[in-house]
Image (cartoon, rainbow, N blue to C red):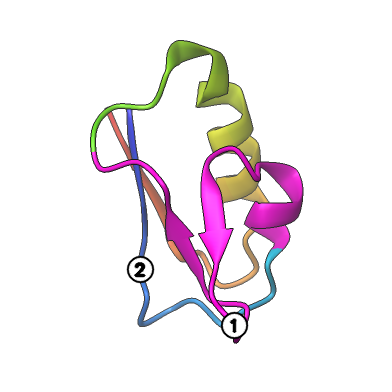
Amino acid sequence: MKVNVDETKCQGHSRCYIIAPEIFEVDDYGYSHSKFTDDLPKDLEEKAKLACENCPEFAIEISE
């Protein structure tokens, strides 16, 4: 599973970071970025899904 943040949609709410700081990092303005360019470790997949579900801007994209 891969996770990506669409930077054009992210509004800096940082909910993903609050839910899964192991996966996401935020810049000085609160905009999120994925720490992973490759597949996520299996133990973080559920947290990635939860973060995706909680993004008010639907900026998190998950692909299998």
Q: Which residues are magenta?
A: 15-37
Q: At 56% from the left edge and 72% from the top edge, which residue is drawn?
A: 57
Q: CA distance from mark 1 to mark 2?
A: 17 Å
Helix, strand or loop at label 1? It is: loop
Of all residues, the one furthest to the right in this rendering is 18
| Horizontal and vertical percent position of residue 60 | 45, 56
8 is within the stretch colored magenta:
no
**Horizontal and vertical percent for residue 33?**
44, 61
Q: Given the current orientation, which residue lies at the most extreme front position?
A: 28
Q: Quadrant of residue 19?
A: top right
Q: Which residue is mark 1?
A: 28
Quadrant of the frame with the N terminus? top left
- Residue 47: x and y in percent read 63, 31
- The amino acid type of the residue labelled 1 equals Asp
**Residue located beneath label 2 in the image:** 6
Q: Residue at x 61, y 79 (%)?
A: 12
45 lies left or right of 54: left
